[in-house]
Image (spheres, helix red, strand yellow):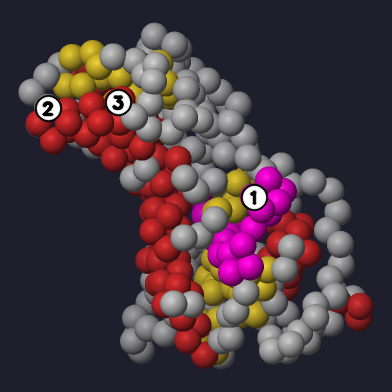
C-alpha cells in the first residue's frame, strides 16, 4: 500500500498568493470561499440499529444510534458528556479489568445506562462478523457535528492538524485518530464523499480518540486547505518522492500535515494546493509506509522538534 504526502506548489494559483520563506514570511492568501461544514458524525458498522439495538437497514450518514465496542472505545464514550448512550452490554464472564473500567467510566458521568449481562453470542449478533468487542458494547448516538470553522475558532499558535485525501479504510482512519490524540493534533480532516463513515470498526481502531479529536468531513478538500492557510497553517504534504525530508523542513507555527490515500496518493488539486512536499525517509527498496504509520511518524517528528 502506498502512502502519499503532499507536494510543494511550484506555481501559486495567483501572483497575489506568493509566499515568502518560512523565516519571517507574511503569507498573502486567497480567501477561501464558502463554509466547510464537517460532521464529526457517523453511524454504525454498515447498518443502523434501532433504539433497542436491533440491526436495521443500511445507514445514512445522518443515521441514528450505533454500536461502539471494545473496552477503551466504550470507556471513553461513557465518560464523554457529549455522547448520548442508550444501552450497555457486558458479556457474562467478562474479566474484572473490563468490569472495573466500565464502572469507572459510568461513575464519572451521571445518567449512563446500567450494564446488562448477556451472552457473548448476543453481542456478536449485534455487530459485524469478526468484530473484536472484548466483551462489551455500547449503543450510542453520533456526537454532535463539529466543523472546521469551529475548530479554527480557538486554535493555538503551534496547532497541528491532519488532512487525509481519499483515505477509505476505517481502521486506518481510526489509527490516524489515535495517533492524533497521542501527539496532540487538534483534528483530522477528510473529504465527505471519499472517506469512511464513523463506524464501530473505526471507533474501535481509534481506541477512544474519537471522543477527543474531531473527525471533520468537508465537501471540498482544496477549499478546506485554503481555509487552513487563512488561519495561518502551513500545509505540508507527505510524498515519498519529495526532495526534502520532514527533519530538513522548517515547520514552526501552525502546521497541517496532508496525506494521500494508499496506492492512489493525493489528487492533483490537493497536491497543487499544498505549500510544501516532504517525505519520511525509508530504506532503499522498501515499498512504502502504511498510512497510519506515516501519520504517526510525521506527528512524532513535529512534536519532537517543538519540545
Secondary structure under the numbered disc 3 in the rendered image: helix
Residue on which disc 1 sits: 151
Residue 229 belongs to the span the image colors magenta? no
Q: Residue at x 52, y 90 (%)?
A: 248
262 lies left or right of 106: right
Q: Residue at x 54, y 46 (%)?
A: 214
Residue on which disc 3 sits: 107
Find the magenta span and give its range.
149-170
Q: Which is more toward the observer, 97 or 109? A: 109
In which quadrant is the C terminus drawn?
bottom left
Q: Residue at x 37, y 83 (%)?
A: 282
> Which is more foreground, mark 1 or mark 2?
1
- Residue 99, compared with residue 235, is above or below; it is above
Q: Indicate which disc residue 94 carries.
A: 2
- Whether residue 67 can be seen here: no
Graded by Cα atoms within 10 Å as few (under 14), some (14 to 19) or many (20 or more), the crowding at tag 1 reads few
300 lies left or right of 106: right
Amino acid at each position: 500500500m502506498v502512502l502519499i504526502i503532499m507536494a510543494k506548489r511550484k506555481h501559486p494559483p495567483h501572483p497575489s498568493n506568493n509566499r515568502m520563506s518560512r523565516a519571517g514570511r507574511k503569507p498573502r492568501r486567497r480567501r477561501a470561499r464558502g463554509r466547510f461544514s464537517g460532521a464529526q458524525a457517523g453511524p454504525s458498522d454498515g447498518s443502523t440499529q434501532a433504539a433497542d439495538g436491533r440491526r436495521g437497514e443500511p445507514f445514512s450518514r445522518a443515521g441514528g444510534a450505533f454500536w461502539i465496542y471494545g473496552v477503551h472505545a466504550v470507556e471513553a464514550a461513557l465518560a464523554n458528556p457529549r455522547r448520548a448512550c442508550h444501552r450497555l452490554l457486558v458479556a457474562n464472564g467478562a474479566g474484572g479489568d473490563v468490569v472495573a473500567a466500565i464502572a469507572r467510566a459510568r461513575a464519572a458521568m451521571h445518567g449512563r445506562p446500567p450494564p446488562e449481562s448477556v451472552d457473548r453470542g448476543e453481542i456478536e449478533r449485534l455487530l459485524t462478523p469478526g468484530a473484536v468487542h472484548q466483551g462489551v458494547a455500547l449503543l450510542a448516538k453520533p456526537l454532535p457535528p463539529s466543523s472546521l470553522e469551529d475548530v479554527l475558532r480557538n486554535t493555538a499558535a503551534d496547532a497541528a492538524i491532519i488532512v487525509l485525501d481519499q483515505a477509505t479504510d476505517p481502521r486506518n482512519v481510526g489509527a490516524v485518530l489515535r495517533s492524533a490524540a497521542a501527539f496532540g493534533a487538534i483534528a483530522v480532516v477528510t473529504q465527505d464523499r471519499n472517506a469512511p463513515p464513523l463506524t464501530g470498526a473505526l471507533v474501535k481502531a481509534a481506541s477512544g480518540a474519537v471522543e477527543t479529536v474531531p473527525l471533520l468531513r468537508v465537501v471540498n478538500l482544496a477549499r478546506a486547505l485554503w481555509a487552513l492557510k487563512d488561519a495561518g497553517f502551513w500545509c505540508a504534504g507527505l510524498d515519498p518522492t519529495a526532495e526534502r525530508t520532514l527533519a530538513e523542513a522548517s515547520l514552526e507555527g501552525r502546521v497541517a500535515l496532508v496525506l494521500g490515500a494508499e496506492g492512489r496518493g493525493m489528487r492533483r488539486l490537493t497536491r497543487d494546493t499544498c505549500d510544501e512536499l516532504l517525505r519520511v525517509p525509508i530504506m532503499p527498496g522498501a515499498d512504502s509506509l502504511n498510512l497510519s504509520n506515516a501519520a504517526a511518524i510525521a506527528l512524532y517528528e513535529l512534536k519532537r522538534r517543538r519540545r
